[in-house]
Image: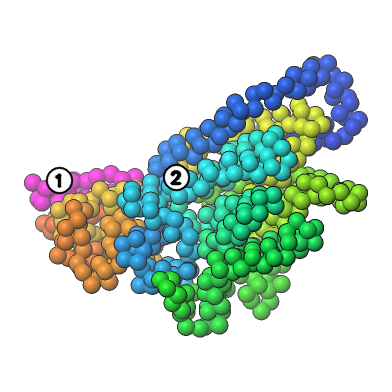
Amino acid sequence: MNWVTYGVFVPFSIVLLCMAFSQKLREKVMGVKALAIAEGKLASWDKWYWLFFVLCLGAGIFVRVYRFCELPKGTNQDGVRGAYESFLLLRNGVDSFGRSWPTYFEAWKYTNMSTLYSWICIPFLHFFGNTVFAMRLPSLIISVLMMPVLWDLGRRMRGRSFGLLLLFLVATNPWQMFQSRWAIDANMMPHIFLLAIYFLYVGLTHRVFLYVSMVFFGLCVYAYGLAAFLVPAFLLPMAIYLVSRRKVRIYELIICLAVFAVVSGMYYWTMIINAFGLESVQIGPFTLPYLKDSHRASEIALAQKDGIFGMGINVRGVFEMLFELNPENAPYDAIDWAHAMFRFMPVFYVFGFVWLWRSRRLEVRENKDTALRTYSVFMMAFMLSAVFTGLQTGVLIMRINYLFYSLIILSGYAIYEMGRRVKLTAVLAVGLIAVNFAFLCTDYFGNKAYQDLVGLNFRSGFFSALKDTWGMDYDKIVIGVSSGTEQNVIEPTVQFAHEIDYKALTEQTDLTGADGNPTGWYYTERYVYITDPDSFMPEPMACNVYVMYKDKYADKFNPEEYLIYDYDLFFAAYPKYWAE
């Protein structure tokens, strides 16, 4: 598919831009009678506006909810870890390390996790239980909500045609579609950041929303640690511009800073505690933890002595991500040929950035104070702050996800300006994206090899096997994995699926069964992890249930002695002796 992208779609996109912005070529195109007739008919497209709105929004929602719990296969370990922390906060008011409402999760001890997604997940677990549906639902809801938000932001910036175009682009965007189905903490941040920018823009005309925006900017840092760089990198130039242009008064700026400081203060204090090795702090129910074993700071370029050099190393990764050049090695983030933005889209968003810069310079030269001058500053600050933040760490789609909304808007700006000149070019650009979106959906929902590849990465069938066996009558559950390292990775999945709260986890109380009654067993007694397939042999007379990898353990179970249940990469086995 990549040869089609670079051999056909990229040249076609460039031709469309030339047709729109080259006066000579535009005159030649309009000199073709059939094209001139088509252009004339497109002049009345506006009467179908709300139909197009419903189609775009409906299509965007459909591809995000269709087979929602089934695809992607498996459960991402970070997603389950975050959901388990949510469950512990809901049940006990502490995380898995016994800290009351921490501002940052110790999680995997050496690599930590942000808290906002887990906080948001709590009511969904309360109403829907510890299920894949409940843990993924916050991501789905916020992703769907961002479609009308982006539409309204575009409408306010450049009119309703621009808003509709942004709605179409976000509805068909590969990154936005894929991340809506994963319960991963980092995926919450770009949505919160976009909401903050949206309310800041609205606040220029309705002042109360200036302060609302600061709440969301403050929440960004709890959504993903890199927001600690992203948010100041965006707000500093915006504050200078808005105050210097008298769009925000000094007292309003002071109130905004105060609101941001109140909301984000505990997180930045947590970072100071860990930077200087200070003691943990308790503020009401919240814990600002010192994580002595954390390696997260070592992943940030500016946190190192040679920070500028570290940022220089990351330049190539950011460049390749911007121009959709790098191969995608994480199939859960993207299908390689499409990547995050479709690989031909840099033609549009690079041109959109250049044209927006050019248009702004003309406004400045003529000393005009128009809406274009303001939203151009918003968009350039949005993109450049994201690029700066991307230079702080290794570049993966999930780690630089805060960049993509700015690229969607810049792409929309380019196509919108094309349509202002030659409507046919904008229609053809939209058609090109729609065709690629159709291919993407066909691959995502119909390509079993791709689905199985994602499932292989995230232990497809394991969570279902755990949920289904929880209610069986057994003494011990024996879980077969491939190594001790994998045991550490999958234990939170076991604990979440079987609703093991903090008191049971630390053996202050015995375990509770699926029926809600005490079992009389403690965690380390009842849960047995097998990490060496070669030395393992099951016990057909023991009242145990087994959940194990097929390819490593299936040949050890005699179907005459065990009931065998299939769960994709896993199987569950229960002795027939105890089933009779």
Task: Please determine whether, in this image, residue 490 is positioned above or below residue 72.
Answer: below
* Residue 332 appears in the picture as rendered: yes
The magenta segment? 553-580
* Residue 6 appears in the picture as rendered: no
Q: Dot 2, crowdedness within 10 Å: few (<14), some or many (≥20)?
A: many
**Disc ID at residue 72:** 2
**Residue in view at x 35 percent, y 72 percent:** 98
Q: Nearer the viewer, mark 2 or mark 1?
A: 2
Label 2: state its secondary structure: loop
**Disc ID at residue 74:** none
Hey, what amino acid is under mark 1? Answer: Glu
Left or right relative to 182: residue 353: right
Hey, what amino acid is under mark 2? Answer: Pro
Residue 94 lies in quadrant = bottom left
**Residue in view at x 67 percent, y 23 percent:** 47
The residue that mark 1 highlights is 560
Query: Closer to the camera, 525 or 127?
Result: 127
**Residue in view at x 75 percent, y 23 percent:** 43
Query: Closer to the camera, 289 or 407?
Result: 289
Label 1: state its secondary structure: loop
Q: Dot 1, crowdedness within 10 Å: few (<14), some or many (≥20)?
A: few
Q: Tell me the distance, in whole angstroms, between the alpha carbons under discs 2 and 1.
A: 34 Å
Residue 541 placement (x, y as % from top left): 11, 57
N-terminal of the pair, mark 2 or mark 1, is 2
